[in-house]
Image (tube, grey):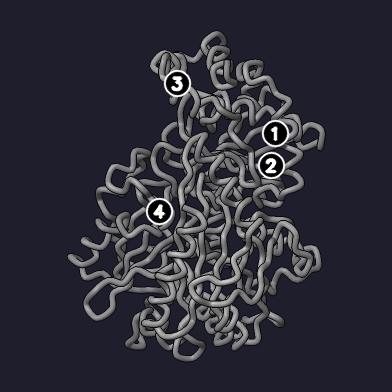
């Protein structure tokens, strides 16, 4: 018998949970379903867990959450870490998984602080730091479709665990018998609800980053039925904004009925918000993903609403923060911007104009948090102005070590109001930046490889690409190839990323997602808009040949 069938039969014999047992019955005789649910153990990667909700070793359920948390507990006990903070978003079973994790930790004698209700991911990072916990857990699958959920693990610094600790935790998890995890034998006093005062302190920290009020600014907001539904409007209203929430997407609902792919990068997810913004003639549409760590915007310009890319919003925020701090006399000596390697180089050019340094890190906001920790260790944290990534994640302020859509939404509203009062839209300001520094444009897309066969195919395609590196992409000569698994030029951890620098400043970057069965592609062109569009088409065709 195959490994999947062996695992399935073991689960049929051992499972006690009625819901999971019923799913196993439904699976009986369906070889493909059994294979996809049991062909592997759900991978604990550098970002934690992410998978489809359901029965099976390759899926997210109370058993895989319990096994993972038992491994975390054993790691914590060996490190003499005695407390953890837990939060969760609006996804299906998020609260159940959070409470399962809390019981496992408490059964190991670890004190747990859990949020009183669903909260944005940055609040989880904040609570770890504010309550001086040894670790933290956030139950979320970020912007994935409704059938997914996930598990993010944080260290005491409020960053998602770095690679070394992630590997160590995985070792502990691998040693856990999934059906021997204790979720019932604990002192109820070890599980404590986080006081509202801590949440209020987080909001105060967010507000402290503000550079100005937005009295009268009309904002249409969508939390995509997620965890930003309370805090984002609260902060915007404190600054004087009129906030109109998209009614169909206002309240938490893990089914995401009106936005099946609740990702602010996807234009389809913004449709209801755009219709309401047009009806209300709002100044801006702001949307946050289900765990409120990413934010997307569409700005009114010439009577229409133009969605901005993550790179465009990031560049605008870099310019706004540096300019605003300079005008207020609060720009630090040797100011620092941090971005990921797949994020536009345009922000670095803007930063240079203000005398600010830009540091590049690997994809993943924890690496931005890692730079913040290095600055803090040297007593230089005041240098940090902001960190950002092209995938709609931004952080200003030093209150957390993860991307924060609450503070980002606030700053986006502020800069919208600032330029509105000067007779400009964010599109106008972006055009000025392009004219000054060049038309940096970007095209991102991905290839999906679902299930067991997809996982095998994805690994083979990446191996084949490394074994036969292209010398021309999009008709442009490859001037430099950087394999971040083997490179020694930059002080960065090893990463499964291939970067191809091309003639004329163009670029192509290839990397597998750390949380989804995807290979992601990031293309850059910096000629005219017309030339960029043609180049992107040819570059994508070349990527199709290599990776489809």
**Residue in the foreground of this view, choosing between 311 and 140:** 311
Gap in Å between the C-alphas at discs 4 and 3?
32 Å
Q: Are marks 2 and 3 in contact (CB under 8 Å)?
A: no
**Residue 207 falls left or right of residue 538:** right
* Residue annotated with mark 4: 263
Q: Which of marks 4 and 3 is in front?
A: 3
Q: Looking at the image, is mark 1 or mark 2 earlier in the sequence?
A: 1
Position above or below: 453 against 381: above
Gap in Å between the C-alphas at discs 1 and 4?
29 Å
Gap in Å between the C-alphas at discs 1 and 3?
33 Å
If the image is split into quadrants, where does the N terminus sit?
top right
Q: Are marks 4 and 3 in contact (CB under 8 Å)?
A: no
Q: Which of marks 1 and 4 is in front?
A: 4
Gap in Å between the C-alphas at discs 1 and 2?
9 Å
Residue located 33% across and 45% down the image: 260
- Residue 248 x/y as whole percent: 25, 48
Q: Is mark 2 on a helix, strand or loop?
A: strand
Q: Are marks 2 and 4 in contact (CB under 8 Å)?
A: no
- Residue 42 x/y as whole percent: 58, 33
- Residue 398 x/y as whole percent: 63, 63
Residue 7 occupies quadrant: top right
Q: Which residue lies furthest to the top in this view?
A: 13
Q: Looking at the image, is mark 1 or mark 4 earlier in the sequence?
A: 1
Q: Looking at the image, is mark 1 or mark 3 earlier in the sequence?
A: 3
Q: Is mark 1 on a helix, strand or loop?
A: helix
Which mark, by number, is residue 31? 3
Q: Looking at the image, is mark 4 or mark 3 earlier in the sequence?
A: 3
* Residue annotated with mark 2: 135
Q: Do the residues labelled 1 and 2 touch (CB within 8 Å)?
A: yes
Q: What element carries label 3?
A: helix
**Residue in the foreground of this view, choosing between 197 and 42:** 42
């Amino acid at each position: 018998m195959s490994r999947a069938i062996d695992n399935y039969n073991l689960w049929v014999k051992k499972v006690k949970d009625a819901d999971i047992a019923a799913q196993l019955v439904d699976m009986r005789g369906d070889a493909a379903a059994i294979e996809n649910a049991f062909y592997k153990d759900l991978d604990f990667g550098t970002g934690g867990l992410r998978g489809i909700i359901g029965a099976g070793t390759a899926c997210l359920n109370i058993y895989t959450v319990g096994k993972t948390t038992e491994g975390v507990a054993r790691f914590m006990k060996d490190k003499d870490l005695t407390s953890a903070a837990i939060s969760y978003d609006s996804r299906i079973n998020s609260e159940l998984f959070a409470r399962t994790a809390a019981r496992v930790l408490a059964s190991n004698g670890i004190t747990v602080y859990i949020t009183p209700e669903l909260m944005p991911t940055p609040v989880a990072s904040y609570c770890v730091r504010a309550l001086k916990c040894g670790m933290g857990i956030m139950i979320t699958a970020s912007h994935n479709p409704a059938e997914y959920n996930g598990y993010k693990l944080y260290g005491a610094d409020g960053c998602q665990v770095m690679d070394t600790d992630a590997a160590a935790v995985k070792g502990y998890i691998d040693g856990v018998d999934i059906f021997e995890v204790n979720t019932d034998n604990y002192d109820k006093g070890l599980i404590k609800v986080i006081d509202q005062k801590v949440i209020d302190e987080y909001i105060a920290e967010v507000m402290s980053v503000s550079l100005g009020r937005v009295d009268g600014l009309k904002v249409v907001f969508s939390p995509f039925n997620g965890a930003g539904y309370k805090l984002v409007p609260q902060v915007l209203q404190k600054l004087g904004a009129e906030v109109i929430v998209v009614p169909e997407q206002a309240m938490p609902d893990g089914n995401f009925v009106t936005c099946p792919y609740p990702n602010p990068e996807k234009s389809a997810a913004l449709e209801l918000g755009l219709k309401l913004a047009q009806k209300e003639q709002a100044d801006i549409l702001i949307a946050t993903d289900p765990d409120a760590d990413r934010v997307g915007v569409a700005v009114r310009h010439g009577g229409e609403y133009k969605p901005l890319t993550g790179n465009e919003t990031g560049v605008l925020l870099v310019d706004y923060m540096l300019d605003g701090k300079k005008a207020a006399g609060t720009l630090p000596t040797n100011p620092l911007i941090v971005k990921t390697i797949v994020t536009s180089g345009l922000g670095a050019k803007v930063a240079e104009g203000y005398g600010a340094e830009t540091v590049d890190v690997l994809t993943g906001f924890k690496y931005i948090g890692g730079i913040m920790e290095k600055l803090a260790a040297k007593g230089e944290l005041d240098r940090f102005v902001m960190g950002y990534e092209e995938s709609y994640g931004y952080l200003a302020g030093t209150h957390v070590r993860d991307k924060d859509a609450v503070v980002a939404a606030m700053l986006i509203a502020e800069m919208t109001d600032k330029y509105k009062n000067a007779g400009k839209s964010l599109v106008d300001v972006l055009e000025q930046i392009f004219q000054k520094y060049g038309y940096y444009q970007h095209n991102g897309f991905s290839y999906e490889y679902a299930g067991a066969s997809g996982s095998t195919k994805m690994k083979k395609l990446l191996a084949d690409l490394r074994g036969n590196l292209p010398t021309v992409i999009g008709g442009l000569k490859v001037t430099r190839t950087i394999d971040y698994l083997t490179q020694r030029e930059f002080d960065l951890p090893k990463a499964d990323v291939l970067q191809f620098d091309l003639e004329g400043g163009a670029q192509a970057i290839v990397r597998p997602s750390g949380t989804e069965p995807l290979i992601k592609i990031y293309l850059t062109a910096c000629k005219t808009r017309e030339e960029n569009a043609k180049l992107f088409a040819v570059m994508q065709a070349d990527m199709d040949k290599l990776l489809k």
